[in-house]
Amino acid sequence: MKLKLALAAASMLVAPAFMTANAQQSNVYVSGGYTQFDGDGGAELGGITGRVGVGFGPNFAVEGEGSFGVKDDSGTELDSELGIFAVGKLPISPQLELIGRVGASRIETSPGGDLDGLAYGAGAQWNLTPVDGIRGDWTRHDYDEGDVDAWTLSYVRGF
């Protein structure tokens, strides 16, 4: 319940950032890809993940993500995953950025229920053009009931 309230409050803080970004030169991006979720209990689940983010200069962004399950494991299925993250970016070259992120997430599985907690990770983005890129990242979802590692490969489109 606390995470739902935190996610709602964070989304209310992020909305004005999207409006501000559109009023200036837009620095909004979206991405879509596949995420492999590997839990401590041995379940390996897969999901389609979408992200929406807004950048503030070359080194900082805020992004929200959502996933829905497409790969089950031994009767366990991913219903959904939602998260909001602060993202740090380190441009190495015009084509390559290193990414670090920290935030909160919620995973719902059947059977199993809901897990809320801290999420953090790192990755890299290879920019094919000024607005198109490929991103690979790892995120650790740190829950009281156990950890879940998520590996994502996605296409990124900037606006």
Image (cartoon, rainbow, N blue to C red):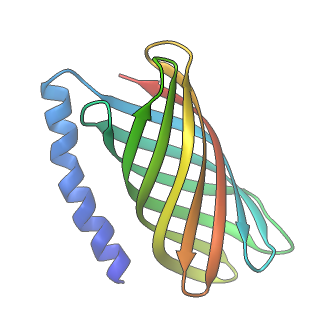
Up/down of 27 relative to 94, above or below: below
Q: Nearer the viewer, residue 8 or 98?
A: 98
| Residue at image location 19% in from the left, 43% down from the top | 17
Up/down of 121 relative to 125, above or below: below
Query: Percent from the top left, x then y, of residue 83?
Result: 44, 60
| Residue at image location 63% in from the left, 75% down from the top | 147
| Residue at image location 22% in from the left, 66% down from the top | 9
The image quadrant where one finds the C terminus is top left
Q: How many marks?
A: 0
| Farthest-out residue, right | 74
Q: Nearer the viewer, residue 91 or 5?
A: 91
Query: Percent from the top left, x then y, of residue 136?
Result: 62, 40
* Left-right relation of 125 to 52: right
| Farthest-out residue, front | 92
Q: Quadrant of residue 44?
A: bottom right
* Left-right relation of 65 to 113: left
Q: Quadrant of residue 94?
A: top left
| Farthest-out residue, bottom | 145
The image quadrant where one finds the N terminus is bottom left
Query: Percent from the top left, x then y, of residue 67?
Result: 56, 54
| Residue at image location 19% in from the left, 56% down from the top | 13
Query: Percent from the top left, x then y, of residue 90?
Result: 42, 36
| Farthest-out residue, top | 129
